[in-house]
Image (spheres, helix red, strand yellow):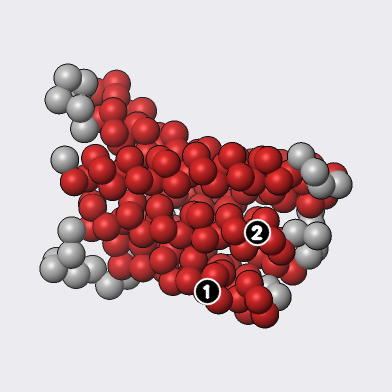
Amino acid sequence: MLISLAYGALLISALFAALQLQRKAQSLSEEPKATLQAAALSAVFLGIWALSELISKSDSIAGTDIATLQRLLSNLAYFVALPFFATALLVSARHCHWQRPAWGRWLIGLFALFELLRRMEHGELYTQVVAVAVTATMFLAAGSNQKRLRGITLLATVNMAIALLLMGPGTLLANQLFNHDLLYPLFLAGALPLSTIAIKQSVR
């Protein structure tokens, strides 16, 4: 029950982030608009994953098909959505917006990199690399942001760092005292709206 509430919180957080970012994007010029839409797409991916987790925990739904779909969406959220979102946060903080084709190439590159390393059987190492890289990117964004936004960006980064480095699939410091299944989506849910505020207010 508690885990379902945690994923419910993540779903609400992701949908809130996606709607806020997309709404803000409508009033912007092309390149800043692409940055916010990239972040919104990442939030949608995370929301879809959270929804799949909620569905999979329903007693009335079970089986191999839902387990396979759940695994695919989990990989989409972790290996694609999180790096994509962190990139959007950094790009917006540094005001060096990418054009839409560049975002598309980066998205395809994330898919390709995951598949390549999976086939090379480096999946476990890459999972940890993603955790460190996303956290480092967000810390860089916090340092690059305007002074008035550094606090909220740093708070979002701390939530994300705890989620990825201590609770997530690529955890570096596993601790059996914590319920990782419960806390991981909760810390992600906390990071998303904070990051969304930072992205929206840093885009000119």
- Report x, y in % for residue 18: 57, 42
Mark with earlier residue (1, 2): 1
In-front residue for pair 198/62: 198
Residue at the spot 21% in from the left edge and 32% down from the top edge: 57
Look at the picture and state if 129 lies above or below 34.
below
Q: CA distance from mark 1 to mark 2?
A: 12 Å
- Report x, y in % for residue 94: 74, 69
- Report x, y in % for residue 185: 33, 51
- Report x, y in % for residue 54: 29, 34
Q: Amino acid at mark 2?
A: Ile
Residue on which disc 1 sits: 154
Residue at the spot 21% in from the left edge and 21% down from the top edge: 61
Q: Quadrant of residue 91?
A: bottom right
Residue at the spot 48% in from the left edge and 71% down from the top edge: 155
User: Which numbered disc covers residue 87?
Assistant: none
Q: Amino acid at mark 1?
A: Leu
Whether residue 186 is visible, yes or no, is yes
Residue on which disc 2 sits: 199
Asked whether, in this view, residue 23 is left or right of residue 191, the answer is right
In-front residue for pair 126/195: 195
In-front residue for pair 13/32: 13
Secondary element under disc 2, as helix, strand or loop, is helix
Secondary element under disc 1, as helix, strand or loop, is helix
In-front residue for pair 114/179: 179
Residue at the spot 73% in from the left edge and 44% down from the top edge: 25
On the rendered image, what quadrant is the C terminus found in? bottom right
Look at the picture and state if 70 lies above or below 34.
above
Whether residue 109 is visible, yes or no, is no
Asked whether, in this view, residue 112 is left or right of residue 167, the answer is right
* Residue extending farthest right: 29
Q: How dense is the environment of label 2, judged by Cα within 10 Å: few (below 14), some, or many (20 and up)?
A: many
